[in-house]
Each structure stands twice: as structure tokens, then as C-alpha cells.
Image (cartoon, coloured by chain):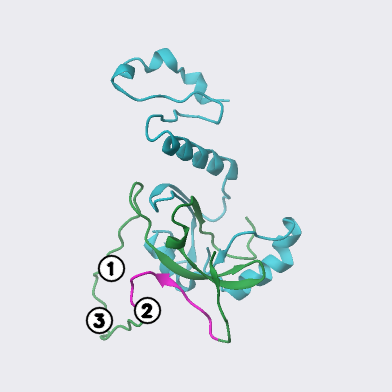
Chain colours: A cyan, B green
Amino acid sequence: MSIDSIFVHKMWNDNELSKMVPGGVPYPMLSDAGGRVGKVFGVFDEDAGVETRGRFIIDPEGVVQGFEVLTPPVGRNIQETFRQVQAFQLVRNSKGQEATPSGWKPGKITLKPGPDLVGKVWEVWKADMAFD
Amino acid sequence: MPEEMKVGCARPTGGVVGESTEDEPQSTILPEKEVSAMIQVGKKAPDFVAPAYLNGKFVSVKLSEYLGKWVLLCFYPGDFTFV
């Protein structure tokens, strides 16, 4: 979503993005004239008149699970976004039984929070597991 | 699926769902009652409707239509910029 009109979105997609990505952008390119929606999400920069680089993960109940906001010169890390979505999906599918520790990636161990784990996290998880 | 919109010369606009789009400030004095509640994790995202471009068509997108699915809502400064 940006403040650009749907007409500009169409031009950008059809003339540039579809050359980067075959078929162009496969999901809706939203238009937020005046930053109305951006304001409500806290990412509209009034001085610059544009949205900052905010990204929100919203679960199937419509609840915001996480968000990240960066200033314009620095792009997002899509791998990290996917990692977070996978983590939130795992937690949700486990119905809150499992949690993902720092640096978790698919395939790494999860934690099962509960009274038994109090003071015993060190037995099942080591700090170097946070890294690749 | 977002429904297709017939778009003429007027620019379609969106906005927060539930908010009146007819609001024009009645007085020139704008009171400081802007309740810009910060987005919080663990709370529901505000519903909104917005015009969009998708696969060659102009459509209308409403966030609440995506309930039941995971949504990644990404804001960015502008088309034809670099990053």
C-alpha cells in the first residue's frame, strides 16, 4: 500500500515490476490517498507525505501479531518476514502449547512453556541455537 | 476475492471502515482531538477499504474480507522509487 493512485500502480506494475517478476505483482496493490489508512496504522509520514516502510502481520482473526517499520532507504528482509509468519503459524497451530525461541527457523526446536520449564530452559536450549 | 470496481475519471479513494467520508471541518479551528491510537500487537487491526490494482483490474479491497487468512500488509513510500 502506498499513496500512489491505482493508475500509477498499474503503470509501475505493467512497465517495470512485471519485468522483474514474471506476471507482475500477484496481489492487490492498494492506494492510500492522503495516507488515511497509513495514519491509523501509525506509518504515514505527514512531513514527507508518504508512507514509511511498515509491514504488519495479521492473523486469521484479524489480530496484529507483529510489525516492523523502517525509514525509506532500507528495504525489508522478506526471508525474515516469512520466518516470522511461519513462527506465528506454528504457535497458532499448536494452540499456544509451543513457542519459538530466539533465532528459531523451521526445523529448529521449539519450547513448551509451562511450570516444568521454569529455570530449566538451559537444559533444552543453548544460546548458540539462536544463530545459524 | 476483492470485487472489481468500475473506474471512470474520478479517483477512487478508500479509508478506515466505520469512518464517515463526508466529514468536512465545519470550523476553521481544528481541535487537537486527533486520537491517533498506536497500533498494538495482540489487538485487532483497524478495518479499512481501499482501491487497488490487481492483475489488470481495478478492485476494491476490504481488510475484513481476509479474515480466515494470514495477511501481510506492507506500506512503502512510493512507486518508481528505488529500494
Q: Is residue A46 visible?
A: no
* Residue visible at 27% across and 78% down in the picture: B30
Residue B13 falls within the magenta-colored stretch: yes
How far apart in space, not on screen, are marks 3 and 2 (Cα)? 19 Å
Placement of A73 over or under B60, stated as above or below: above
Neighbor class of circle 3 (other Cα within 10 Å; few <14, some 14-19, many 20+) is few
Identify the subunit bearing mark 2: B
Which residues fall within the magenta stretch?
B10-20
Majority SS type along the magenta span? loop
Amino acid residing under circle 2 = Thr
Q: Residue A12 appears at what percent x and percent y?
A: 67, 67
* Residue visible at 27% across and 86% down in the picture: B26
In the image, taking residue B42 as reference, residue A18 lies left or right, namely right
Q: Nearer the viewer, residue A27 or B27?
A: A27
Q: Residue A103 appears at what percent x and percent y?
A: 50, 29
Placement of A131 over or under B23, stated as above or below: above
In this figure, which residue is indicated by the disc labeled 1?
A: B34
Identify the subunit bearing mark 3: B
In the image, taking residue A73 as reference, residue B68 lies left or right, namely left
Q: Are marks 1 and 2 on the same chain?
A: yes
In this figure, which residue is indicated by the disc labeled 2?
A: B21
Closer to the chain start, of discs 3 and 2, is 2
| Rendered image quadrant of residue A7 | bottom right
Amino acid residing under circle 1 = Glu
